[in-house]
Amino acid sequence: MRIARFLTTDGRVLWGRVVDEGTAEPIDGDMFGAHVIAAHRADVARWLAPVVPPNIFAIGRNYAAHAKETGAQVPEAPLIFMKATTSVLDPGREIMLPAPAPSEVDFEAELAIVIGRPVKNVSESEAPDCVFGYTCANDVSARDCQRNDKQWARAKGFDTFCPLGPWIVTRDELDPAACPIRSRLNGVVMQDSNTRDMIHGCAKLVSYVSHQFTLLPGTLILTGTPEGVGFARKPPVFLKPGDTIEVEIGGIGVLRNTVRAAGA
């Protein structure tokens, strides 16, 4: 099932089951709890980020080829960092190149896990049952901030630096260990891999992160990006105003965003 958050043509923000590109069946109740899917349909004006996360945890260097292209060691345990919840961006909206750091903004295609219920200290075998579903994410990163700050909060947390969507595919309809994952910049393939190449799979990540933090319903875990990012290329390729960046994950769909300069 594809679950989306959307703006209706009459101005309401709803969650619902996706019917087609312009129609959804609204959800009445708690998306992560008791709810029913309405018998009627709503016209979609535009899709919104499919979840409003209480926290965003992300995993660094979870593909060996990406660690190699950056000259970094593969960590023994999952490398966790956080993105600001204010970095969430709707599908189809503009990534803003921030005024303090507009010159080295990069893209990272990622599979995102959406947690479905409160989770703490869950085992790896039990972890899949705690997942609501999966969506596409772009872990946009200001590489100069990442390099100069010596930590990643600012580099990964600027407004608009976490595009999500276009919808969530529920866990019963997706094998997160076998999804083609790609990014395209202005139609040119930049990253082309498969989630089977992740070092730590989704069940391991949910279990590991839950032993560090309580995971609330709607929490996101971004699972890392494969090789092909812009700053590792020779010469480097960074986002610039007017670009279109797409993240495509097999079984989910395409997350598409354009790019603009701050103040444009």
Image (cartoon, rainbow, N blue to C red):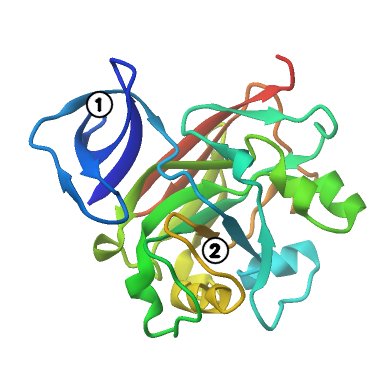
Question: Residue 130 in the image: x percent, y percent?
Answer: 37, 70
Residue nearest the observer in this picture, 179 or 168:
168
- Give the number of the disc on residue 125: none
Task: Please say if the residues under marks 2 and 1 sit with CB atoms less than 8 Å apart.
Answer: no
Q: Element at badge 1?
A: loop
The relative height of residue 92 versus residue 29 in the rendered view (above or below) is: above
Image position, residue 153 (x, y; %): 76, 52
The quadrant in which the C terminus is found is top right
Q: Please say if 180 is above or below 163.
A: below
Q: Is residue 82 visible?
A: yes
Q: Amino acid at mark 2?
A: Thr
**Residue 234 visible at all:** no
Crowd band around label 1 with a 10 angstrom C-alpha radius: few (<14), some (14–19), many (20+): some
Q: Residue at x 64, y 73 (%)?
A: 64
User: Element at badge 2?
Assistant: loop
Q: Which mark is residue 223?
A: 2
Q: Amino acid at mark 1?
A: Gly
| Residue located 49% across and 72% down the image | 206
Left-right relation of 79 to 121: right
Give the residue drawn at x 69%, y 62%.
81
- Using the image, determine if residue 130 lies above or below residue 7: below
Q: Position of residue 132 (x, y in %)?
A: 34, 60
* Mark 1 lies on residue: 22
Given the current orientation, which residue lies at the most extreme left position?
A: 39
- Position of residue 56 in the picture relative to residue 39 (left or right): right
Q: Is residue 131 left or right of residue 244?
A: left
Q: Residues within 10 Å of mark 2 (few under 14, many from 20)?
A: many
**As drawn, 40 above or below 231:** above
N-terminal of the pair, mark 2 or mark 1, is 1
Pinpoint residue 207: horizontal percent, then vertical percent.
50, 78
